[in-house]
Amino acid sequence: MARKKVVVFPGDDTAPETVYAAMEVLARLAPDIDYVEFPPGEEWVRGKTSGEARAAIDSSDTTLFGSTSGKTNAILYLRWGKQTFANVRPTRYFKGFASPLARPDGIDFVIVRENLEDLYLGLEGPLGMLAPLALTSRITREPIDTDAKGIFAIKIITERNTRRVADFAYRLARKRKAAGGKGKVTCSSKYNMLRESDGLFRRIVEETGASYPDIKYEEFIVDDCARRIVQSPHDFDVVVMPNLYGDILSDAAAGTIGGLGLAPSGCYGDDYAYFESVHGTAPDIKGMGIINPTATMLSAVMMLDYLGFADAARRFENAVRTVYAEGKMLTPDQGGRAKTADLTRAVIANL
Ligand code: IPM
Ligand code: MN
């Protein structure tokens, strides 16, 4: 197999501490990877140009990305530039995770979050801008008062994007079914209220299911879905939703297994994917050496699978599992007293 090229953005605030921990493990696993490493966000803003970042990404196989508070703006290129339309966020309980639930064993589902549109296009502005449109509310049947002081935001749902993320979700459900999964796609949006936009999302996901007769389909309005994620997470397999709901509910989902320190993600397009934790940059614990690197480590596991290094991926994942099952080297967010470096050493020792 040819060597792979991986770009690394360590990210902002405390995120680099997790990325460097994951890279230490990757170095021991030594898959055939060459790394192109950029500096953390704080150096980045004064440092390399984004043109350089783009060129590195374009000539790479994938990117490992530390969370950003906005300083590492390469995320815009990694999502919209590379059209990584499916944000895959697994929620999987490993024995030893500090779940707040009484019976977290067996929680194993994936949120597939549409990653490019919805309210994430930054289409906002003063209400006055809408005046020429003479809009009427479908709910109140009154004209919108565009003289009021206020801001609008536009939500866009396209058929094309919904169809490709739906297809991705069904294919993932099929793959999981082959490995013993439930073979089910759940669609969630606020289709009872946003009948046109979220209604379109719901309709396209359901229609797409016709091409996957082996996969079950169900749908829940997003508020109900949020409650189910907390109360009966075991019932889910693959859950597909628009961007903003997926953002919010993937944090909620992480909460069911023990928090954001444990939640990985990968953003996949047709010809590129990149990997990042679900969590933010945890500025409150910067430099303390106590951030939980597990989310970034498990994102690196997803990256290894994407690159075709399945054996290394299993070794990495099993080592993480062992460390949690033993429960001796856990970071404070998991109720332990270990440092980031202790947990990293323990993972390496169990490879
Ligand atoms: C995430 C983050 C990002 C998002 C932010 C940093 C823009 O919260 O990846 O979940 O909302 O997508
Ligand atoms: Mn988020």
Image (cartoon, rainbow, N blue to C red):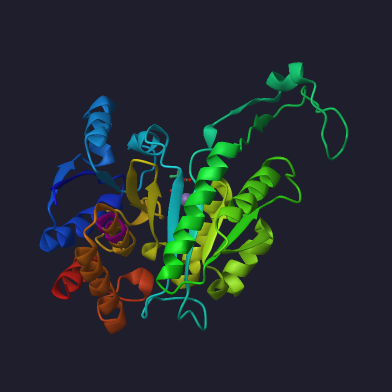
Q: Residue at x 58, y 61 (%)?
A: 213
Q: Is residue 112 left or right of residue 24?
A: right
Residue 314 sits inside the magenta stretch: no
The picture places residue 224, in percent across and down from the top left corner, at 68, 63
Is there any visible trace of residue 153 in the rendered image? yes
Q: Is residue 153 above or below residue 237?
A: above
Who's the residue at 58% across and 67% down the image?
A: 229
Magenta range is 300-304
Specify whether residue 259 is in view. Answer: no
Q: Quarter of the image containing the C terminus?
A: bottom left
Q: Position of residue 263 (x, y in %)?
A: 40, 62
The percent position of residue 320, horizontal first and vertical second, equals: 27, 72
Compared across the picture, whether 285 is left or right of 346 comes to right
> From what the image shows, is residue 321 above or below residue 29?
below
Q: Write the residue at 67% across / 45% down.
A: 198
Magenta-colored stretch includes residue 301 = yes
Seen in the image, is 53 located left or right of residue 82? Answer: left
Classify 131 as above or below 259: above
Q: Main secondary structure of the magenta part?
A: helix
Left or right of residue 38, residue 210 in this image: right
Question: Residue farthest to the right?
Answer: 141
Q: Nearer the viewer, residue 164 or 288?
A: 164
